[in-house]
Image (cartoon, grey):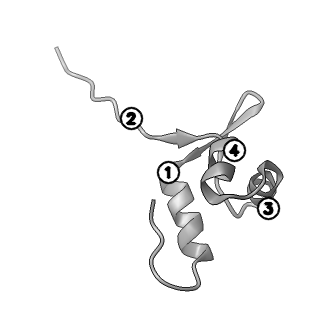
Amino acid sequence: MMKTEISVTKFYTIEEIAELLRVSYLTVFRWIQANKLSAYKIGKRYRIEISDLNKFLENSKKYGNTRL
């Protein structure tokens, strides 16, 4: 039998991203709507992959190094 490997990726909700970055829910939602922040829409909810958040932060960076 072949073993199937499952890759587990960390996903965040809009609420969690807003809390992490200390911005409002609506701000994060607007970033997604403007295609600034990539997200998966599952049903009526959005999920943001950690790598997409890091890309967003890197593109938004003005000074220093930003990684979560």
Q: Name the residue under label 2.
A: 8
Q: Nearer the viewer, residue 28 or 49?
A: 28
Quadrant the C terminus occupies: bottom left
Q: Distance between the residues labelled 1 and 4?
A: 12 Å
**SS at circle 4:** helix
Q: Mark 3 points at which residue?
A: 34
Residue 5 horizontal/vertical position (percent): 27, 29
Q: Nearer the viewer, residue 60 or 64?
A: 64
Residue at the far bottom: name it: 63
Q: Which mark is residue 50?
A: 1
Q: Which mark is residue 27?
A: none
Residue shown at the point (69%, 42%) measured from the top left? 15
Residue 45 horizontal/vertical position (percent): 73, 33
Task: Name which quarter of the figure residue 2 lies in.
Answer: top left
Q: Distance between the residues labelled 2 and 4?
A: 19 Å
Residue 18 horizontal/vertical position (percent): 69, 51
Q: Which amino acid does label 1 sit on?
A: Ile
Q: What residue type is labelled 4?
A: Ile
> Are the two marked residues, 1 and 2, in contact with CB atoms closer than 8 angstroms?
no
Mark closer to the chain start, 2 or 4: 2
Query: Callout 1: few (<14), some (14-19), or many (20+) C-alpha neighbours within 10 Å?
Result: some
Query: Callout 4: few (<14), some (14-19), or many (20+) C-alpha neighbours within 10 Å?
Result: many
Mark closer to the chain start, 1 or 4: 4
Q: Name the residue under label 4.
A: 14
Residue at the far top: name it: 1
Q: Distance between the residues labelled 1 and 2?
A: 11 Å
